[in-house]
């Protein structure tokens, strides 16, 4: 009798759980994101092991049949060193060297901003994270404007215009790519390490000082060990980001035949080697997954670096003394090199007829508002060109739709994860929505191309349409949007929703009148920040955009390919302005400040 009662109770609870709105939504979202996220990745994996159309003669098998041809070609063929091993070596070396530069500059800068009496400390805390808001390849275009030479590019840069011929190794290749990556990652280190430095307990340093330890010893023996989790996390995340970066290596590497995995992947797609592209993309996914696994492993061990007391003394501001002026000079130099120099170079390059000549008669606004320019296919200034406004409109509406959808979906994912009575649904949904974080943008684009390039069942071929760009932007932003939604919903109690339910409000009314109004700030965050990221994104869309779905980022790359440097730089200036204005608006609306750090 008692067993029968328990069974009937279990069945009753199961029926209630199945009818719960969060359960129904969870199942629906798992199906949707399974198609938008998991299916492309699976299709990518399959493309590495299936014969592609057009490769039947090479493989000796029909299209769609299993094959190890692409694996052998990438890993064990006479061209393996060209298409894989050399790009892999270059990618890893560039990533490690740029991370070293970022850490050497970023960690001391973070300490100066968080724990010293540096003049204008608050202002520099915001100013030095500006490069974080800009596309990484902005710096490569500025570098090219200054250092390019006619021996490789056929055009002269500013230095050559001034009579100084930069060597090829300085103008192109691994050295400038490493420097640019390093400078671009410095704000990332500052953002991640700042909070960790502020949380170093003052009493530990006081104890060491009382025992006679000097400032250098205190920093080496106390501060750095406590910062190890934040530094390791920043290192791993920078590595995951570096292996998927495309724009910088494309602009500065291809002219001297310096390949990395991202550019090799792009070339494989451009030459219709889909199987080879699939194998390289799988390698990028594996590197991203390994990086995340290491990061999670280190975070689990981060408890060993926690302070004993939960009420540690507030971190004290250290006095720089005689080092105050050199520290101010160093931070000012960093700001000049990472912000003023690249942005100023790009702006100036768009108003100079001849690069490197600074006489007044050389300045012009023709590249902005001129007509009948001597550039075939782009005869008007960027502000008068229909192509610019078309790309700008595509950028705003596509990225805007994707950001709004990802923000709303992120809130709903958070609702399901927190409210669903079946915990496994929330667990599966969190794992699926986090998957794009494992996949570099270029590899994710290849995955979408592999899935949506041809009709599949009731879904038509989406390549060449705006739909595929909007869908991949939504999917790519779900790791952030879903985490924002989960965090927001965990802070929201269920009392208000339950009270509305007792008053007879349906689920839609409860969401519209109770849940969403209370989560406006979180919804705005989950919408605005993906918009800023989408405006400056290149790796994700360079493969999928077509002339009819051109965005500002892809338009700038096309102009670079044509050699129209002035117009390309002007487009990048517009992108930077949109990103900076969007970031400023987001911070004002959300009452947050990036300079406070991202936490570790």
Image: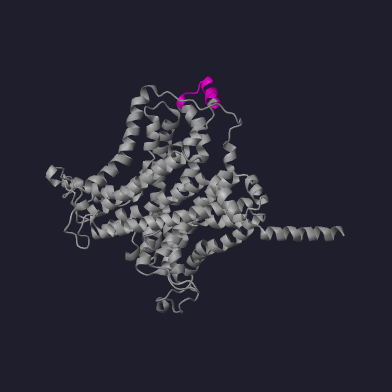
Q: Is residue 429 above or below residue 187?
A: below
Residue nearer the viewer, 213 or 368 = 368
Q: Residue at x 24, y 58 (%)?
A: 385
Q: Is residue 8 magenta?
A: no
Q: Is residue 212 magenta?
A: yes
Q: Is residue 210 visible?
A: yes
Q: Residue at x 63, y 57 (%)?
A: 21
Image quadrant where residue 54 sits: bottom left
Left or right of 270 in this view: 567: left
Question: Which residue of the protein is positioned furthest toward the front in this rendering?
Answer: 503
Residue nearer the viewer, 174 or 153 = 153
Left or right of 76 in this view: 9: right
Residue nearer the viewer, 452 or 279 = 452
Left or right of 183 in this view: 528: right
Count of number-bearing discs: 0
Question: Which residue of the protein is positioned furthest toward the left in this rendering?
Answer: 361
Estimate the x, y position of residue 75 in percent, counting from the top left.
44, 65
Q: Residue at x 46, y 64 (%)?
A: 447
Estimate the x, y position of residue 566 in percent, counting from the top left.
22, 52
* Rendered-image quadrant of the N terminus: bottom right
Residue stretch in magenta? 203-215
Image quadrant where residue 300 sits: top right
Image quadrant where residue 493 sits: top right
Estimate the x, y position of residue 394 in percent, counting from the top left.
35, 59
Q: Residue at x 58, y 57 (%)?
A: 429
Residue nearer the viewer, 519 or 78 = 519
Secondary structure, magenta segment, majority class: helix
Q: Is residue 82 above or below residue 499?
A: below
Q: Is residue 81 visible?
A: no
């Amino acid at each position: 009798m008692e067993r029968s009662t328990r069974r009937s109770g279990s069945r009753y609870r199961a029926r209630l759980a199945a009818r719960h709105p969060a359960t129904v939504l969870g199942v629906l979202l798992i199906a949707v994101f399974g198609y938008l996220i998991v299916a492309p990745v699976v299709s990518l994996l399959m493309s590495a092991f299936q014969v592609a159309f057009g490769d039947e003669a090479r493989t000796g098998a029909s299209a769609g049949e299993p094959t190890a041809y692409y694996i052998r070609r990438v890993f064990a063929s006479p061209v393996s060193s060209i298409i894989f091993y050399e790009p892999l070596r270059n990618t890893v070396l560039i990533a490690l060297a740029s991370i070293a530069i970022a850490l050497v500059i970023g960690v001391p800068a973070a300490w100066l901003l968080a724990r010293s009496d540096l003049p204008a400390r608050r202002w520099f805390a915001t100013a030095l994270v500006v490069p974080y808001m800009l596309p990484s390849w902005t710096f490569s275009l500025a570098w090219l404007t200054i250092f390019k030479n006619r021996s490789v590019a056929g055009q002269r840069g500013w230095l050559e215009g001034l009579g100084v011929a930069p060597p090829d190794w300085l103008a192109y290749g691994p050295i400038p790519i490493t420097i640019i990556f390093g400078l671009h990652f410095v704000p990332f280190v500052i953002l991640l390490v700042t909070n960790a430095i502020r949380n170093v307990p003052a009493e530990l340093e006081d104890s060491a000082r009382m025992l006679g330890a000097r400032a250098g010893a205190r920093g080496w023996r106390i501060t750095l060990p406590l910062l190890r989790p934040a530094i390791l996390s920043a290192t791993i995340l920078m590595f995951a980001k570096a292996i998927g970066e495309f724009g910088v290596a494309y602009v500065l590497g291809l002219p001297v035949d310096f390949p990395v995995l991202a550019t090799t992947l792009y070339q494989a797609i451009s030459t219709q080697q889909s199987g080879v592209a699939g194998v390289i993309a799988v390698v990028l996914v594996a590197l991203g997954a390994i990086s995340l696994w290491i990061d999670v492993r280190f975070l689990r061990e981060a408890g060993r670096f926690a302070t004993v007391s939960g009420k540690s003394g507030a971190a004290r501001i250290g006095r720089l003394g005689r080092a105050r002026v050199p520290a101010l000079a160093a931070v000012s130099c960093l700001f000049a090199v990472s912000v003023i120099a690249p942005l100023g170079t790009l702006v100036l390059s768009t108003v100079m007829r001849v690069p490197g000549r600074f006489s007044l008669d050389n300045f012009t606004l023709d590249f902005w508002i001129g007509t009948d320019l001597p550039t075939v296919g782009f005869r008007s200034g960027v502000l008068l060109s229909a192509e610019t406004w078309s790309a700008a409109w595509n950028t705003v509406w596509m990225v805007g739709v994707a950001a709004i959808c990802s923000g709303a979906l992120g809130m709903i994912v958070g609702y399901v994860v927190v409210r669903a009575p079946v915990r496994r649904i929330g667990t599966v949904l969190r794992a699926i929505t986090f998957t794009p974080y494992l996949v570099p943008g270029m590899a994710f684009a290849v995955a979408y191309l592999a899935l949506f390039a041809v009709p599949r069942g009731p879904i038509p071929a989406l390549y060449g349409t705006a739909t595929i760009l909007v869908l991949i932007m939504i999917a790519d932003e779900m790791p952030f949007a879903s985490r924002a939604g989960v965090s927001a919903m965990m802070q929201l109690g269920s009392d208000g929703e339950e009270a509305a339910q007792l008053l007879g409000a349906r689920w839609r009314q409860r969401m519209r009148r109770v849940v969403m109004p209370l989560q406006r700030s979180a919804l705005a965050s989950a919408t605005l920040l993906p918009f800023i990221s989408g405006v400056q994104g290149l790796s994700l869309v360079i493969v999928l955009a077509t002339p009819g779905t051109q965005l500002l980022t892809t338009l700038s790359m096309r102009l670079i390919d044509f050699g129209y440097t002035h117009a390309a730089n002007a487009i990048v200036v517009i992108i930077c302005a949109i990103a900076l204005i969007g970031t400023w608006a987001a911070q004002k609306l959300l009452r947050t400040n990036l300079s406070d750090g991202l936490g570790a």
